[in-house]
Image (cartoon, helix red, strand yellow):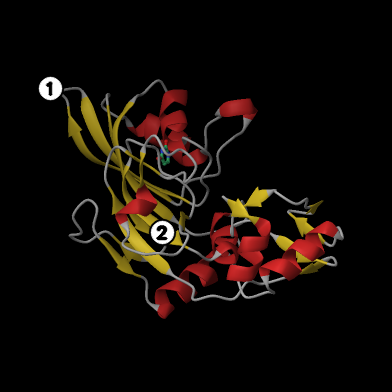
Amino acid sequence: MERIQKILSAGGYCSRRDAERLIKEGRVKVNNKVAVIGEKATVKDEFKVDDQLISLVKEKKYYILNKPKGYICSNVDAQNKRVVDLINNDTYLFTVGRLDVNTTGLIIVTNDGEFSRKIESPSSNVPKTYIAKVNKVISKTMLEKLKEGVVILDNYKTLPLQYAEVMRKDKKRNESSVKLVLTEGKKNQIKLMFSAIGVEVINLTRVKIGNIKLHDAKLGDYRKLSKDEVNDLLRLSSQKK
Ligand code: URA
């Protein structure tokens, strides 16, 4: 979180002093609420001056990282190890969406709030592929239920899955590994979906976002996304579900 005047000036909109003046004059809105001096925000928020959306220019950065266990996607909680600190960079970065602290796998990290909002939006249609190791042998019926959608929190029925497959069944240990492709991302969605059919997730990894795969990346590894990869994600996000 940073002071709004700092975000506006760092983003090249105006000087810090001018930003303070605009705020005092009540002309700046953050997420459609009039901003006040001293208020803090992040570049992920939406800024308007005189009711016009402003875009903050700076070099846009996009990374894909293989998140290890024990790292959190939030930037606020300084008590924990943060995903963004794994990236050697001096700009303010944040993750696109979240993975739970114990989930591993692909996460996009950026400083582009507009891109992040598009990819994360509920109407976004970027498929995300997960492999879940669970504490039961998953039957055809159970898999069908997950595919069709199950009721999780607040009576919400999950959207039909793009794909689901039991990849491994271990009857002796009473475990399975299941591949799931989702186009939505409610908090803890996969754990809640399995829980809705009486199953617990032991391990969860995200192996693909859109067309970007994990390949052989080690935990903690990251690389820049190419322009084509960024454009492909934006294309997918605006496709109809
Ligand atoms: N679903 C979950 O339950 N956890 C994650 O980290 C991602 C999806």
Residue at the image point whose x is 55% and y is 66% from the top? 115
Q: Say what amino acid the circle numbered 1 marks.
A: Lys
Q: What residue is pinned by disc 2?
A: 108
What secondary structure is marked by label 1? loop
In the foreground, 51 or 19 = 19
In the foreground, 117 or 159 = 117
What secondary structure is marked by label 2? strand
Residue at the image point whose x is 27% and y is 39% from the top? 69
Please tell me the numbered disc located at residue 27.
none
Query: Marks 2 and 1, Cα distance to the nearest angstrom?
Result: 37 Å
Residue at the image point whose x is 45% and y is 57% from the top? 127
Drawn side of residue 17 relative to residue 179, left or right: right
Residue at the image point whose x is 15% and y is 23% from the top? 173
Q: Assess mark 1: CB under 8 A from ligand 1?
A: no
Instruction: State the image coordinates of residue 106 (x, y, percent, origin top left).
Output: 34, 54
- The answer to which image quadrant residue 109 occupies is bottom left
Instruction: State the image coordinates of residue 209 (x, y, percent, origin top left).
Output: 39, 58
Image quarter in which the C terminus is found: bottom right
Classify 175 as above or below 116. above
Q: What residue is pinned by disc 1?
A: 172
Residue 241 appears in the rendering: no
